[in-house]
Image (spheres, rainbow, N blue to C red):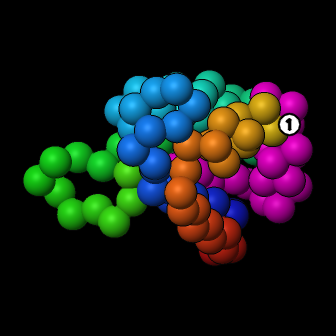
Amino acid sequence: MIKHIVMWKFREQAEGADKAANLARAQALLHACADLVPGTLRLEVARAEPGLEATCDLVLYSEFADRTALDAYQEHPRHRAVKPFLRAVAQERQCMDYEI
């Protein structure tokens, strides 16, 4: 199994919208990627919550059956379509994939 975790810190303003609007849009776009490819075992998207510790604004946690499934997800046209928006609204991005 491959775990794929991505965290973003968002800009206060970008793409003509404020951080809250961009976070909501990003969360919806990423949730829409949950069932794109066979081998996707889990996909969660969460925003930082007031009162809980966080060093990022948005996190994607996903699990894939194997590298083939993760690669298919990464290259899927609907997933690729989300990336330009995320690059435009995020000031920082951290990612880690690991196999268990």
The quarter of the picture where the C terminus appears is bottom right
Q: Is residue 69 left or right of residue 28?
A: right
| Residue 6 in the figure: left or right of residue 54 | right
- Residue 38 at x, y percent in the picture: 79, 37
Residue at the image position 53 percent from the left and 57 percent from the top: 91
Q: Residue placed at 55% from the left, 50% from the top?
A: 90
Q: Quadrant of the N terminus?
A: bottom right
Q: Is residue 53 magenta?
A: no
- Tell me where residue 20 sits by quadrant: top left
Q: Image quarter for residue 79?
A: top right
Q: Is residue 15 left or right of residue 75?
A: left
Give the residues in magenta.
Answer: 60-78
Camera sees residue 39 = yes
What residue is rendered at 78% in x and 53% in y? 70
Picture coordinates of residue 30 (x, y %)?
59, 34
Disc 1 is placed on an element classified as: loop
Give the x, y percent position of residue 33.
Answer: 67, 32
Residue 68 among magenta residues: yes
Say what amino acid the circle numbered 1 marks: His
Residue picked out by circle 1: 76
Q: Residues within 10 Å of mark 1 (few under 14, many from 20)?
A: some
Count every numbered label the image shows and give the total: 1
**Residue drawn at point x = 88 percent, y = 44 percent:** 75
Question: Could you say where residue 35 lies in the image, as x and y percent from the top left?
Answer: 68, 29
Q: Determine whether 54 is above or below 82 in the image.
A: below
Specify whether residue 37 is in view: no
47 or 44: nearer the eye?
47
